[in-house]
Amino acid sequence: MLLSRECDRRAGVYYRQGKAWFHISSAGHEGLAVLGELLEGGDFVVPHYRDRALMISRGMDVEEQARDLMGKARSHSGGRNMSSHFCYQPGNVFSIASPTGSQCLPASGIAWAARFRDESSVVLCSVGDATTRQGEFFEALAFALERDLPVLFLVSDNGYGISTPTADFVPSGLGMVPDRVMWDIDAADPDVLHDAASRAIASVRGGGGPAVLWCRLDRLDSHTSSDDQRVYRTPDELAVLRDPIEVFRSRLLREGTVTPEQLMDTETRVAEHVEEAFDRVAAEPTADPKAVHDHLFAPQTERDAACEAIGPVAARSGDTMVAAVNRALRTGLRDQPEMVVFGEDVEDPKGGVFGFTKGLGETSDGRVTNSPLAEATIVGAAVGLAAAGMRPVVELQFIDFVGPAWNQIAAQLTTLRWRTLSAWNCPVVIYAPWGGYLPGGGIWHSQSNESLFTHLPGLRVAVPSTPADAEAVFLESFEAPDPTLVLLPKNLMRRRERTDAPPSPSRGSRVLRTGSDVTLVTWGNGVDLSLAAVDALIGEGVTTDVIDLRWLVPLDRETVAASLRRTGRLVVVQEDNRTSSFGAGLLADLIQTDEEFYSLLAPPRLVTRDDIHVPFHPDLEDEVMPSVGDVAAAIHSVLR
């Protein structure tokens, strides 16, 4: 507790001296250090940003605290994550992301992994009181209750969400937490906290299911170094705040456990140790700015190994994408005991709304399991499973419904490796039906919003257009060390594989037609449109390179650029709407270098949907979606 308090004091000094840029004090929360005595080595901590004392108890020493504050090269994030966003992989401390509450669902996922492995470990998920109004807190608690997971939700209730008093809107005051899991305690007294927490953890570890340890304490300092609580808290209120160090010190003196001289000596020794450690760390180097791109993905050798593990996938005459995905999932479940398939309606007899998982439950040993109707839970639990070493594969019924899961994808899934220098990684596979050209879909079943996901660094994005491509993408993704999103064109799901289809490689693009006049680049549903237009123009003497990207991230840029340098003309075909789309970005990327730009013989063209939603009636959908005629017209345009 004294180490934590002194770290906060020294951090404040460094902040005022301009040696640090941001600080969150844990003053008033130091009593949580007692939890370190109750947790075991195999337990996990998914922390809150005021858990400094708890972090010290898990092994994140003063030097690590100082490196975290100053963003040094040897810190857990190498200066990439904000200070007080704790992470300590040797102590099973998961990395903090700033969106409050985003840690709750991964915590439940980590606990779920322990259930799968029949381990006795406990997951401590720590949040603030204001965070408990986040929907993901409720989803995580509901999921833990549903699955009887060993999660202890630790709520540090200091009465404020920054400047807003929370007493009237937190779940404890509204009666929203079941009494059977609720432990409401005075955590300003470390002994009281120790007694209650020991019983709560024993219950969770013994199979009693999740618990909520609601800890009432006080925040002694302002919210952060950017805040001044004197603006919104009265002097009288500040004067009566309870200090757990003073509570404990008074008890020790009253009981004669220590003398005033011993306490003073300890405090002096702690202050000197912290000052010396901070000064020494201040002289350490910061991270090399040129290395900031490292750890976005796994090393190339690991990525290559994933591709080499499966090799090309042979096409099967008459095969469908649904059958190919089902076969790939069956193979993954057979070969990887750590694989879990999770999503709405994926269990038999339904087997998913499109049938991707039909029949897989027969041999999966419970590893194909239905989720609640909650996309954030699906992806968030998968993040936790992956962080704990499992291989989760999750289905979203339509990519249009990804909104509730966006926080988990953008805040957790795609940043985890990078913000922890690969100490934690997240090889989740997400797949979802995608795109239009299937009448009757309308606004919320026909989106082709791939640009939302290609905009997120750290996420691989694939859009297969054939059964063999789909199988190759899935099999490679099961081996890959990074998260993957597979978008499956609904219009092509039941299309039969042609008899002369070539094998599908696990990486890169595929050149479907070769020619000398035009380079045409597309993916997904755009492949059919493009081939139909190109084949119709052969009679006019026009020959075209047709490149199916298949993988949008990583992009096989060199294949496209080499074709463009040879033909001098470029057409990109997509079904997404124009503004800020992947196709628009691809055009900009391809003409930004001199070699490609000065190869152009005509302005490049983007065949795309206008900035309009996809309507429900088939006639209206036909009006807004790109057509074969649109592709042919674009080719003619660049040939003028």
Image (tube, grey):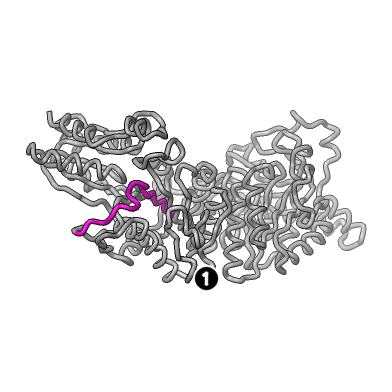
Q: Where does the magenta region start and end?
A: 482-499
Residue name at image x 75 percent, y 54 percent: 213
Residue name at image x 78 percent, y 42 percent: 174
Question: Which is more toward the observer, 635 or 565?
Answer: 635
Q: Position of residue 558 (x, y in %)?
A: 23, 47
Q: How many marks?
A: 1
Q: Quadrant of the N terminus?
A: bottom right
Q: Quadrant of residue 585?
A: top left
Q: For residue 493: magenta?
A: yes
Please indicate, yes or no, whether residue 423 appears anywhere in the rendered image.
no
Q: Is residue 94 above or below residue 538?
A: below
Read off the residue under disc 1. Answer: 365
Counting other residues with Cα less than 10 Å from the Cα at mark 1, is it few (<14), some (14-19), or many (20 or more)?
Answer: few
Query: What kind of residue is marked 1?
Result: Asp
Q: Secondary structure at mark 1?
A: loop
Please indicate, yes or no, whether residue 560 appears anywhere in the rendered image.
yes
Name the side, left or right, on which 595 lies relative to 241: left
Residue name at image x 66 percent, y 38 percent: 224
Name the side, left or right, on which 168 lies relative to 25: right
Q: Position of residue 223 (x, y in %)?
A: 69, 38
Q: Is residue 73 above or below residue 602?
A: below
Q: Position of residue 543 (x, y in %)?
A: 11, 41
Q: Quadrant of the C terminus?
A: top left
Residue name at image x 65 percent, y 67 percent: 121
Q: Is residue 221 above or below residue 235?
A: below
Q: Position of residue 458 (x, y in %)?
A: 42, 49
Question: Which is more toward the observer, 41 or 626?
Answer: 626
